[in-house]
Amino acid sequence: MGARSQSDGRRSGSRTGGPPGPAHPWAVLRREELLDLRLCDLDLTIEGTWLEGCIERLGEELDRRGLRLRPHFWLSDEWFCPNGIPGIAIPFYLAHPRLMRLEYEELGSVEGGTRRECLRLLRHETGHAIFFAHGFHRRRKCQEMFGRPGRPYPDAYSPDPTSRDHVQYLAKFDVRYQQRKGVTLERAEGLSEGLQRTILRQSRRISRILDVDGYVRLDYRLDKDGRLFFLEANPNPDISCDEEFASAAEAAGVGYESLLEKIIRLGLQRNS
């Protein structure tokens, strides 16, 4: 099963390739007809697909690290770990090669469509699952640093540019919240050379452990005493020109066009 999944996973990144899946009547439908179907009409399962091999591999990796948690998995419309739930949603299109080809035709890519990329995303979401399974979001230290998740947001707020308080997770996704809180994206200043070397060394080590050979965004935080905390790795970060990944590249002397060229070149080299 593992060998078959590995081979199929490599083919799934191509336009016409993909892992063999269970036979379904809708697999022969034309594109327009297939797009009219509801997700519940597809009768998809993880069992019997190449995804089983990826999940088994994840379990082996957790065993080697002495981690007993086994997240539960289900098919949904995208990758995510629900707030407070130690489980992982996997995009439904990965459960059948016809849907993977349709995803590629519609979007030009298949997120998690190879065994390597699927494992990276599973590892990433497992980090969230572990976080919720052990109740880290309920611990005082975590709440002191990131705030209480159940705390309601005020209707109005005057930002204090000198405050070092952490904002909530909406600062990452909600533009209106960013404006209310006065959140701006800027390069970290005042970092000592020693701390910068530590971040670089840790980032390289983490990338090797996670088997990252392309691009990745690693998130860190510093507490008030200057101690460094690694939060998570994002193997498929937002590469919009105004997001953190592109801004970090620009701070390192890599312009946006050059960044996109590097990403495209890496993809071509991997699939050549």
Image (tube, grey):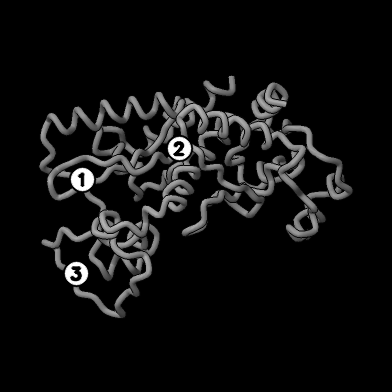
Please name the amino acid that badge 2 sits on.
Pro
Q: Residue, x 66% and y 29% (percent of image)?
A: 9
Q: Position of residue 197 (x, y in %)?
A: 19, 27
Pointers 1 and 2 in contact (CB under 8 A)? Answer: no
What residue is disc 3 on?
A: 159
What residue is disc 2 on?
A: 235
**Quadrant of residue 39 in the image?**
bottom right
How many other residues sit within 10 Å of disc 3, few (<14), some (14-19) or many (≥20)?
few
Q: Which SS class for mark 2?
A: loop
Residue 129 left/right relative to 24 = left
Looking at the rendered image, the quarter that the C terminus falls into is top right
Residue 159 left/right relative to 58 = left
Q: Is residue 90 above or below residue 154?
A: above
Q: Which SS class for mark 3?
A: loop
Please name the amino acid that badge 3 sits on.
Pro
Please name the amino acid that badge 1 sits on.
Leu
Q: Position of residue 139 (x, y in %)?
A: 32, 57
Q: Which SS class for mark 1?
A: strand
Residue 107 left/right relative to 80 = right
What residue is disc 1 on?
A: 222
**Quadrant of residue 40 in the image?**
bottom right
In the image, 126 versus 114, the foreground residue is 126
Q: Position of residue 154 (x, y in %)?
A: 29, 77
Which comes sooner in the sequence, label 1 or label 2?
A: 1
